[in-house]
Amino acid sequence: MNYDQYIAAKTHLSGDHGFSPLSTPSFLYDFQADLVTWSLRKGRAAIFADCGLGKTPMQLAWAKNVVEHSGGRVLVLCPLAVANQTQREAEKFGIEAQVVRDGKIRGAGIYISNYERLHYFDRGDFTGVVCDESSILKNFDGATKKAVTEFMRPLPYRLLCTATAAPNDHIELGTSSEALGEMGFADVLSRFFRKTKKTYTRRDEHRGQVYSLRGHAVRDFWRWVNSWSRAVRKPSDLGYDDGAFTLPPLRTEQHVVKASTRPEGYLFDVPAIGLLEQRRERRRTLAERCERAAELVSDTGESAVCWCHLNDEGDALERMIPGAVQVAGKDPDERKVEVLEAFASGEARVLVTKPVLTGFGLNWQHCSHQTFFPSHSFEQWYQAVRRSWRFGQMRPVKVDVVTSEGESEVLANLQRKQDAADRMFNEIVSEMKNSLKAKTAPYEGPKAEVPSWLQ
């Protein structure tokens, strides 16, 4: 090997484990075809693409190539109700794919199911797997993360897709790396991170530690992430024209309600400090917040989504809003799918639901109005809003944030997480652009001359 190859062998950058695409579907935009080609050559890769950039057609094109190349099967894992949506997309693009919920498969092809059904499938039946909304892997010790990672471990072809790669902290990228067969999560921590108490870090409650990137390892970390992932907020991040991929205006308005009762032990409303006080504040102001949210959507005649977090909030909103339908955690999966499809088709005008249940993967461009009760989860906020505010939405989107006077700390925390997420995406995109430029740009440095005594 030459010197460049010797140095490259010393790095921890991901290699190529795949193949050149057998076909590139004509329905893909240029930047989508570029991402599919890259991910097929990698074999095990992640596409962190923003909402509405076409992750579903890219997943289907990737899976079709893997099936044709290997003669095997690809399993596409989705959140609840997204499976049927993915199958409809496959039919629209002329790709054969079927939803399977019982694990019974027949012949080569693309099979679609929900994460909750993974235990019905035998990983030995598949050569590839696609994880839609792969941020589900972010929980370090979550049961779903363990099951999915173990299922993927022996498969030669793996694809992760999400708009929120690491919604809480950079260390969550280690779970994606581990699922792809790159560096394990523990190795990522020891190589790139250190224990610290600096601002903008996250407490890992299981380990009782706080981590942040080592100062000297920042660039190496993003280079490593860029070796197995691509982050795209708009086509121009890959050097393409944005064209129709332009978001409409987003209008966010805060509505502060006045509670009819005082906080326990106080003569007037004060900011709730700590999770316990914030939970009490949410319970204390439940009726007032629900009444305000109901007022905002009841008489508009337009489709709307009312996001909540508590069962009592959902029941109250469903009761207060004429014709509203609710998706609750207690509902059977069949009932959830039925209600979500009724809303997507316009049969139901107002949907009451929780971000944790239906805030991922669904396309609701027909709806441009939402109400939201905030929580500390930036991922839930971002994903819920992006069900409507996404590429393909033709109207301005309005989000009415309904809070009490005591929830100022919750909103401040959400803003902090928004800033941190923006920085992370900027780092990945910046390093990706530098990497692509380095591969294509000619050398522009000074010319070296060999000394005469060496000639």
Image: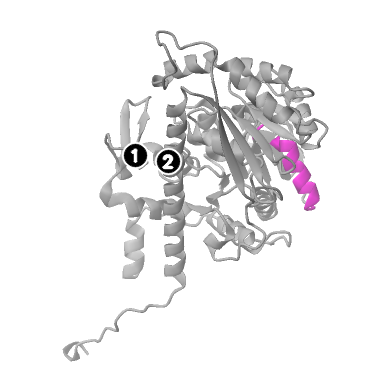
The residue wearing badge 1 is 189
Position of 327 compared to 203: left or right?
right
Label 2, on which residue? Answer: 174
Which amino acid lies under the numbered mark 1 shown in the image of this protein?
A: Leu
Q: Element type at marker 1?
A: helix
Q: Which sits earlier in the primary sequence, circle 2 or circle 1? A: 2
Nearer-the-camera pick, 170 or 108: 170
Q: Is residue 328 above or below residue 35?
A: above
Q: Does the magenta portion include 93?
A: yes
Query: How many numbered tags mark residues here?
Result: 2
Is 147 placed above or below 7 here? above
Residue type at mark 2?
Gly
How did the renderer colour the structure? one colour
Residue 129 is situated, as x and y percent measured from the top left of the image, at 61, 43
- Tell me where residue 141 sits by quadrant: top left
Which stretch is magenta?
Answer: 79-94
Q: Secondary structure at mark 2?
A: helix
